[in-house]
Amino acid sequence: MKPLLLIDVDGPLNPYAAQPQRRPEGYTTHRMRPTGFTEGKPLRVWLNPGHGAELLALADSYELVWATTWKDEANDWIGPHLGLPRLPFIDWPVMHGRAPRGTFWKTQYVLEYAGARPFAWIDDDITALDREYVEQRHPAHALLMYVDERIGLTRPDFDALADWADDHTA
């Protein structure tokens, strides 16, 4: 069974914290109105169309899963711009809630979703506390990859994900 690749949108795919007046190179600007953005200006989202091909290449080694607050809406708003098929998603029971031992609120639910499967998780809110928590509680291999929300995913990130999958695919 392939490991999971758990994909956050804001930060890894949408470098939302880049300087607002300077769209990152290779990215296109999209205006979106997902749930919660019904009034005022639509949400600005920067996406790099090349990331879709990179993720699809990784799908040979991983099962791709959205691990984002966009939940299933990532399939409607994000995936089509990247050329991705509809992906399963983590349906967070509680978003932005309390988390154990100083971890990111998603971490406990990522472990629940992964079960005993190996996984790689890309997110801009991963810290050393999350890595420690997962290492102590997850029975399989896990890669928690922090992605800078000002930069987004880069070539070395995709290479590291491919290398990790090569080393941890049963």
Image: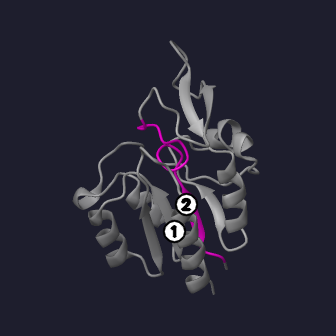
Residue 163 in sight in this render: yes
Residue 117 in sight in this render: no
Taking the magenta stretch, the answer to whether it contains residue 91 is no
Quick one: 93 or 154, which is closer to the camera? 154
Count of marks placed on residues = 2
Quick one: 60 or 72, which is closer to the camera? 60
Label 1 Cα neighbours within 10 Å, binned few <14 / some 14-19 / many ≥20: many
Taking the magenta stretch, the answer to whether it contains residue 6 is yes
Write the residue at 59% across / 68% down.
4
Which percent across, then down, holds residue 136? 32, 77
Write the residue at 35% across / 76% down.
135
Over which residues does the magenta segment extend? Answer: 2-18
Q: Is residue 166 above or below residue 68?
A: below
Write the residue at 37% across / 52% down.
125
Quadrant occupied by the C terminus: bottom right
Residue placed under numbered mark 1 in the picture: 120
Hey, what amino acid is under mark 2?
A: Leu
